[in-house]
Every structure is written in C-alpha cells, then in structure tokens.
C-alpha cells in the first residue's frame, strides 16, 4: 500500500547512551521503528530493553545532561526532532504526540483538581478553544463521571486516574499516543476496561498508538503490529498475526513460552536461561547470544541484517538463523505497510 | 488421613480506615492447604487475598474464626510449640528488595536465619541453601549485598532465607510479579523442585491466572473478601462455575 503521508513516527538506527557514575550505559543500540497514521503498534520488551528510553526519546524526555543520541534520527510526521533543544521541545510537546505512563500519580499534580489539569493542557495547546466545554467533552470521552472534574488525583481509583491522565493527554489532540505500560499497575478487569477505552478512542479519533509493554497478551488484544526489543535493539517485528503465528527469533519464541507458562517434554516450565544483559558492556554481536539456545559462532561477532519472512514484507527478524534479505537494510527496517 | 497442614475456619477480619469506617477485608473464609499441596489464591487487589495470607502466617490475628496448624489451634499450643509452628510457615514477597535488609551481606542474612532456627554448622548450611536455590557456586555470593544481585537472584536469596527455617508451608505473595517474563520459568521450576525435594506446600497469592493454572493443584477465587469458588485448578480455571470467575478469566488477554 503506498503511503502518501510520512509515518507519524519513524526511528532510524537510533543509538542513545546514558552517562552514569558506573560508566556509559548503551540504552539504545541502533533501534529502528515506524508507526503509521492511525495504526496501533506494540513495543514489547523486558526491563533494561530500552523500551521506555525509546518512548521518552520520542518526546525529548530523557535528561538532557546525562543522555545523548549518538547516532540515528527520530522523525515525527516527517519532522526531524533528533537534536531539538529543551526549549524547542517545550513548544513542540503534546502535539502531535502525547504520552501516558504506568503511574498516573507521578504525572498528575496532587494538589490540583482533575478538571483544572485538563483545562491547563487545553490552554497550552489550543488556547482559543472554549475551555470549559472542552473539559466536559474530554471527561466524557474517557468515560469518567462529570462530577470527577472537581476531584483530586488521590480521590480516584487506579483505573480512574489512568482515565484522567488520558484526558489530559488527549487535550493536546495528539495524532500519536504513546502508552508506557498503561495497565501494569491495574487489576485485570480494570486493565480490560482501559484497553477497551484505548481501542474506542483510537477508532473515534483516528489516532495512532505506540503501546509499550512487557505483556504479549496485551499486544495480542490491542495491536496490529509489534516490535520485540532486547538490549536496545529490535530483534523482530511484523504484523501481530504473523509474529504470533510464527515467532522467529529464539528470544521471541522463548518469551512466548514463558508468558504462557508452557512446559517442555520433561514437564519443566519453559524458561530463558541466564540474566538480562548488562548494557554497560559493548555488545558487538547479537545481544541475546549469551542466553540463546541456538547461538552459533557468528552470533557473537556481528549483529545480522534483517531477514524478511513473510510475503508482502510484513514480518522480519534479525537473526543469523535466517538468510538475510538482499535489500538495503533501511528499506527493510522501514517495512510495515501492513 | 491426618489433619491438613493449614486449616482456616470461618475467618472474618476487618480494618478501621483512617476516617473511622470499618472495612471487612475477609468475610467468613474457610480454606485448607494439605501437606505438600499447592493452593493458589487468586483475585483482584482489595479482594482480601493478601490479608488472608498474613492471617495464615500468624502476622494478623483474625477478628473471628480459627486457624488450625496440623489440626491444632494456636491457642492450644505451648510457647515452644508456637515458636516452632511459626517458623514452619514462611513468607516470600513480591518485592524481594524490601524484605532483605540492604546493609546485610548474603552471609549475614542467611546466618541470622539459621541461628534463629538454632542450626549447627551454619557455614556449611549456608552454602547448601544458596546452591539449592541455584546460586552456584554458593561461596561467590557470600560477601554480596542485596543490591549487588539481579532481580532474579534476589528472589532466589529470599527463597533461600525462607528455606533456612525448614518450613513446611511457604506463603508466596505475588512471588513472580517483580520478575521479568523470561526468568519467571526459572523461579517456577525452582519452586517446583523444592516442593518435590522437601515436600513443601505453597499458598500462592497471585493475580496471574496463567501461573495459577500452571502451578497450583487447587485454586480459591476471592472477591470482596469472600472465596467465591474453589476446587481443582484445571477445573476452576477452565470451566468456572461462578460468574465472577468467568468475568475474571474473560478479562485476561489470552495468548493462543
């Protein structure tokens, strides 16, 4: 399908480091990802995978002093935001990208009523709107009772707080919503409600979503495409039905078994051996190689290029087990016009 | 057959909110855990499952109802019996970091537990414990502090410390919630091995249905302080009889 508009979000081979007292941490080691207008994309990873760093980089939220984008670029709706200054971010933030977090309390102001916080968000981004009416609309949109406009964050349940934070985010009328583990702190039934609300909002507003999670089940129920990230590198990506139908990277395969609490022939729970990687070390090859049951000599030497697995280029993997595709790497990594 | 290892009979317990209102956290709950049995207590936050776990551990005295350990109430026991009964039930919590003193080395943490039990040859037992939870070779971990271990290693250390008391029942409150997906299997395998090797019983408190289904012999589903359904795990979690259980299962995003 030809794309007339540029993708709402595009990361090309982004390398990002943090300077810490213990040395340099390589949080993103060449991460590429694309989100098209209106599309729901999952970014799946464990702790230390770089998934939240990636999300914060898109909004310029990583600390300016200690973090640095060493290479690559980030485009929002075609605009290069890789080198924006903090002041430029202040002006740009919210539109067309907004973000919600796992813990709404760390973002909502504890001593300001919910309605006021939504109003401030509107005033910042569209000051000419009739603010009061718009606050009412947003509260209705996220299915909160209108009386809660006068409530303080601590008076709300976890699910209601997430709805309130969504209302603040949507006040910017974003074309892309980044949701970083939005339901991790919630009970399953509340989680199901929030996921249903997100689906509903996307349909109504035609908004794209990048859903960041460690939970493959959530991606299965909420996303059209997904990326699997490990140690700051995307190892596999594609349409959800393709990746779920035939996961290719040994890490993705292991993750699926672990998430389902599958057992092997000996009745043992499926597991991925070893520990998540130390990002202080320079990984030349595939970062998963030390834990990989199928690791070969090449794996430690270099990171493989992408291999396209599905017809129509809807599924790809970076793993030496698969023959590389002979196109330019960036072309392959930008695929996903599914 | 002897009396079950743990038997909770008609337990009701409430808390007073800061405003003064009384909240009933657990309402007339009866539950048993047999020797070597794994029972999962599933439900949402606020369902009362953690309160019930604390009652089982003797950390909370219920308002009404009785707790039997191997057929006897705590009230019938002498102080020596009571002490032994207490160490026979050990907790593991979700956040191993919070339950391990950050200023103590692995050597101290395990030594303290072993001394509390009155064990001899502590140095040897310490290494055995570390190796039995997969921290091998044990001696390389002795001088480390909890923050110098990975999340998975810390959870193993917390398990080793519980084992130092030679428990017969482990009350595990969300033991896998803090662990990454890829290392969950390691912890589950460890808990299974310990069950086989030591005949341990588990009361596992979890909101994760897939773990309850995979790991437990029996399941009790809690909602609003009450056990709404209990029975064999395979049955309750595949063919639930109660509406609440059905709703709970339907809410879990399923991986085929």
Image: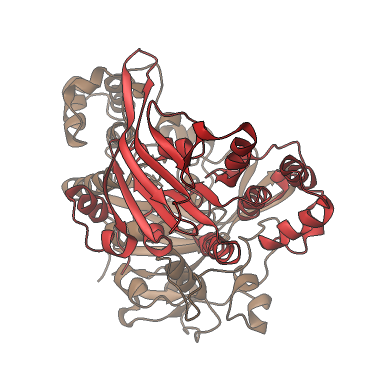
Chain colours: A brown, B red
Question: How many numbered discs, if any?
Answer: 0
Does any portion of residue A42 appear in the rendered image? no
Is A256 rendered above or below residue A6? below
| Spot occupied by residue B76 in the image (x, y as percentages of width and height) | 51, 34
Is B199 placed left or right of A206 in the picture?
A: right
The C terminus of chain A: image quadrant: bottom left
Question: Between residues A202 and A101, which one lies in front from this camera angle?
Answer: A101
Is B245 placed left or right of B59 in the picture?
A: left
Q: Residue at x 24, y 21 (%)?
A: A149
Q: Residue at x 31, y 16 (%)?
A: B21
Is A301 rendered above or below residue B20? below
- Residue at the bottom extreme, as displayed: A323
| Spot occupied by residue A262 in the image (x, y as percentages of width and height) | 42, 70
Is A236 rendered above or below residue B131? below
Place residue B1 in its image quadrant: bottom left
| Spot occupied by residue A44 in the image (x, y as percentages of width and height) | 44, 59
| Spot occupied by residue B201 in the image (x, y as percentages of width and height) | 50, 55
Place residue B227 in its image quadrant: top left
Q: Residue at x 30, y 57 (%)?
A: B231
Does any portion of residue B171 appear in the rendered image? yes
Question: Between residues B243 and B180, which one lies in front from this camera angle?
Answer: B243
- Residue at the top extreme, as displayed: B20
Question: Between residues A243 and B7, which one lies in front from this camera angle?
Answer: B7
The N terminus of chain A: image quadrant: bottom left
């Amino acid at each position: 399908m030809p794309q007339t508009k540029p993708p709402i979000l595009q990361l090309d081979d982004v390398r990002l480091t943090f300077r810490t007292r213990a040395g340099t941490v390589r949080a993103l080691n060449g991460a590429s990802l694309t989100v098209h207008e209106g599309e729901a994309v999952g970014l799946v990873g464990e702790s230390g995978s770089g998934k939240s760093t990636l999300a914060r980089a898109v909004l310029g939220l990583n600390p300016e002093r200690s973090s640095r984008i060493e290479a690559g670029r980030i485009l929002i709706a075609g605009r290069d935001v890789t080198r924006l200054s903090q002041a430029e971010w202040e002006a740009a933030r919210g539109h067309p990208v907004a973000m919600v977090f796992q813990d709404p309390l760390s973002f909502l102001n504890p001593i300001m009523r919910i309605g006021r916080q939504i109003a401030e968000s509107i005033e910042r981004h569209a000051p000419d709107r009739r603010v009061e009416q718009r606050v009412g609309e947003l509260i209705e949109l996220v299915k909160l009772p209108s009386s809660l406009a006068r409530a303080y964050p601590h008076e709300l349940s976890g699910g209601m707080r997430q709805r309130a934070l969504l209302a603040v985010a949507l006040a910017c009328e974003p074309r892309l919503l980044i949701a970083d583990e939005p339901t991790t702190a919630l009970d399953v039934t509340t989680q199901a409600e929030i996921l249903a609300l997100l689906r509903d909002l996307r349909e109504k507003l035609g908004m794209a979503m990048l859903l960041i999670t460690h939970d493959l089940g959530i991606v299965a129920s909420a996303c059209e495409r997904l990326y699997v990230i490990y140690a700051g590198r995307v190892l596999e990506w594609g349409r959800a039905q393709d990746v779920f139908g035939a996961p290719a990277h040994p890490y993705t395969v292991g993750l699926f078994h672990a998430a389902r609490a599958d057992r092997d022939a000996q009745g043992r729970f499926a597991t991925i051996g070893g520990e998540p990687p130390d990002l202080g070390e320079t990984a030349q090859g595939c970062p998963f190689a030390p834990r990989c049951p199928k690791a070969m000599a090449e794996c430690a030497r270099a990171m493989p290029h992408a291999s396209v697995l599905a017809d129509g280029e809807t599924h790809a993997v970076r793993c030496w087990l698969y023959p590389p595709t002979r196109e330019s790497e960036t072309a392959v990594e930008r695929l996903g016009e599914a | 057959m002897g009396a079950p290892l743990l038997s909770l009979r008609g337990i009701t317990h409430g808390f007073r909110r800061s405003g003064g209102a009384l909240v009933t956290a657990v309402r007339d709950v009866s539950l048993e855990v047999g020797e070597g049995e794994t029972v999962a207590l599933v439900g949402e936050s606020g369902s009362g499952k953690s309160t019930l776990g604390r009652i089982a551990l003797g950390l909370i005295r219920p308002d009404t109802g009785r707790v039997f350990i191997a057929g006897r109430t705590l009230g019938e026991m002498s102080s020596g019996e009571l002490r032994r009964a207490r160490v026979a039930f050990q907790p593991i919590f979700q956040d191993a970091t919070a339950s391990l003193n950050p200023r103590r080395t692995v050597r101290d943490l395990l030594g303290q537990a072993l001394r509390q039990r009155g064990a001899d040859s502590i140095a040897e037992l310490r290494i055995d414990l570390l190796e039995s939870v997969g921290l091998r070779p044990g001696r390389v971990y002795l001088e480390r502090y909890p923050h110098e271990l990975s999340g998975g290693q810390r959870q193993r250390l917390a398990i080793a410390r519980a084992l130092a008391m030679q428990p017969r029942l482990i009350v595990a409150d969300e033991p896998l919630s803090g662990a990454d997906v890829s290392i969950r299997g390691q912890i589950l395998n460890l808990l299974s091995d310990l069950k086989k090797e030591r005949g341990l019983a588990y009361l596992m408190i979890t909101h994760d249905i897939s773990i309850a289904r995979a790991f437990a012999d029996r399941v009790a589903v809690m909602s609003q302080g009450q056990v709404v359904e209990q029975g064999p795990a395979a049955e309750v979690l595949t063919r639930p009889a109660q509406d609440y259980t059905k709703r709970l299962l339907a809410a879990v995003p399923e991986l085929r």
